[in-house]
Image (tube, rainbow, N blue to C red):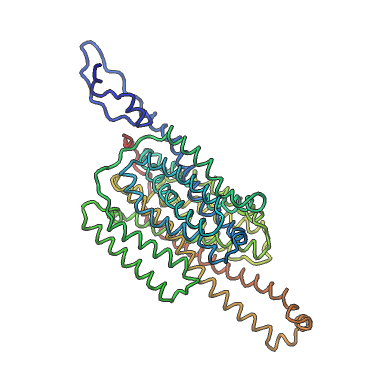
Amino acid sequence: MASPRVGEASVPELIETGSTQSLTPVTPTPTPPGQTLPAPAPQQSKEKGWGLPLAILIVGMFMSVLDTSIVNVAIPVIQKQFSVSTDQAQWITTSYSLCEGVVVPASAWLGDRIGLRRLYIWSMLGFAAISALCGLSGNLETMVLFRILQAVPGGVIQVTCLTMIYKIVPPRKIGAAMGLFGLGVVVAPGIGPSLGGYLVEYVDWRLIYYINVPIGILGTIAAIMVLPHIAGARGHRFDLPGFVCIAVSCFALLLATSEGPIWGWTSYSILILFAAAINLIALFVVRTLHTEHPLLDVSVFASRPFVISLILTVFLCSGLFAIVFYIPQFLQNGQSLTPWHTGLVLVPQALMMVILMPVAGRLYDRFGARWPAFGGSLLVGVGSLLLSRVNIDISRPELIIYLMIWASGLGIAMMPIMTGGISSLPPAVINSGSTFSTLTQRVAMALGLAILTAMATTQQHQLMADRSALLSGSGANTNPQILEMLKQGPSGLLPLWEQLQSEVAAQTYSNVFLVCGVLGFLAAGMSFLLPSGSPASGEKPVVH
């Protein structure tokens, strides 16, 4: 059998790559006399070839991020069914966050080692399979174990998706692509409570896990058929000391922020965890600068736009997770809404992000990151300040309008900020940039929520003490309504006590949203440090 000529690809090679766009560059053969070379394929076809792969990546990212918010709604029900305390039930989410923080730093190396396409496919399959095991859990211990295992592919999916976008999308279209990709990053936490509330209230809480199975299987099949092969940089050894440093540092930091309100922020355990996190991250930087093949390339921090984008991400993600966490609590505890009706209140703000994120991507392609980041961050600040007017008597239409203003700003600002930062990096360090960006989001959400929760808890205790003192003061002895309630015994003051708790909680949430507004305005001011103007256009032939 004659061997294939130079430049020809065999059928097995086509099957391995999964796409005709993945062929290696051919060596031109001499043109016989009297013949002309065929016209080159138009470049337009390559620009049109990234839409379907992007849709597949959005599905994976959406599934991974949705799982972090949809589970929160079911925790009270799981707590009752498994007969465990609130602190024990919180490990369902805490264990996932801790393991995810450990896995994310290794995702870039895995992508280089086995290829991004193959890594994405295996991660989707693993996430779907372990989600089914989570749904089958019969007690808290097995569920926490499966949640730890589920976080491994969940963390890998997020880094892999972000890296692949910059590999398959031409620079001139990266803003539009990231605008669509943002639907999985920001919209999923917004609709998670709605979907989770419906499943918990009207069907079964186990469906919050089972819903990932068909999505994961269909996403895997689509990835096998559509995603192009992207060659990795094989041959680099795994930097085990560097991985241990950054993984343990992330674990210590996330554990401290999760357990700080319970163990006490000034307790020896929390202080030791924070000290370990700081020292280990410093050791990681030293290790990275003195090894030939580091786990992550810290030279990405030499790019000012990338560093600014990380700072802005911290500001916006802290407010995002705080508002997404506290608004459902206010609606269910302060206004006695069911989980399903709470989710319905949150639907309009999620729709605003669905509409505006693709628009924000196109704005980035035309004007750069500065102006969308400024306008969006300003709206985030305004919306958060409006939310600080929350009280137990606020009408739901008014609350929905405030949430829509806040969500509009987030939908406009978030993706241009991330895109502007990562796009400023050289192609060789995109993997490291994606990893640091994902880590920043996870840590900012956990740390921001922990700090705001500590502030809220302290204020709530102080406000309750101050107002409770009024019930036993001289003013209470002359108030006819309180005197009448006291005649009925301790139970007579119960309605007044419940009202007092609701008012104090609402005032505490108001102060939290005020801080979120300040963070939004700080982000708007820092947005002027981002580059402006249309990003450089051109093709990036990175699909081999």
- Residue 505 drawn at (x, y percent): 61, 70
Q: Residue at x 39, y 28 (%)?
A: 45
Asked if residue 193 lies left or right of residue 357, the reply is right
Q: Residue at x 68, y 62 (%)?
A: 336
Q: Is residue 75 visible?
A: yes
Q: Is residue 470 above or below residue 199?
A: below
- Residue 490 drawn at (x, y percent): 73, 80
- Residue 231 drawn at (x, y percent): 31, 38
- Residue 82 drawn at (x, y percent): 59, 60
Q: Which image quadrant is residue 77 in?
A: bottom right
The C terminus - image quarter: top left
Front one among 520 and 393: 393
Asked if residue 148 lies left or right of residue 510, the reply is left
Asked if residue 366 lies left or right of residue 343, the reply is left
Q: Is residue 183 visible?
A: no
Q: Is residue 418 above or below residue 171?
A: below
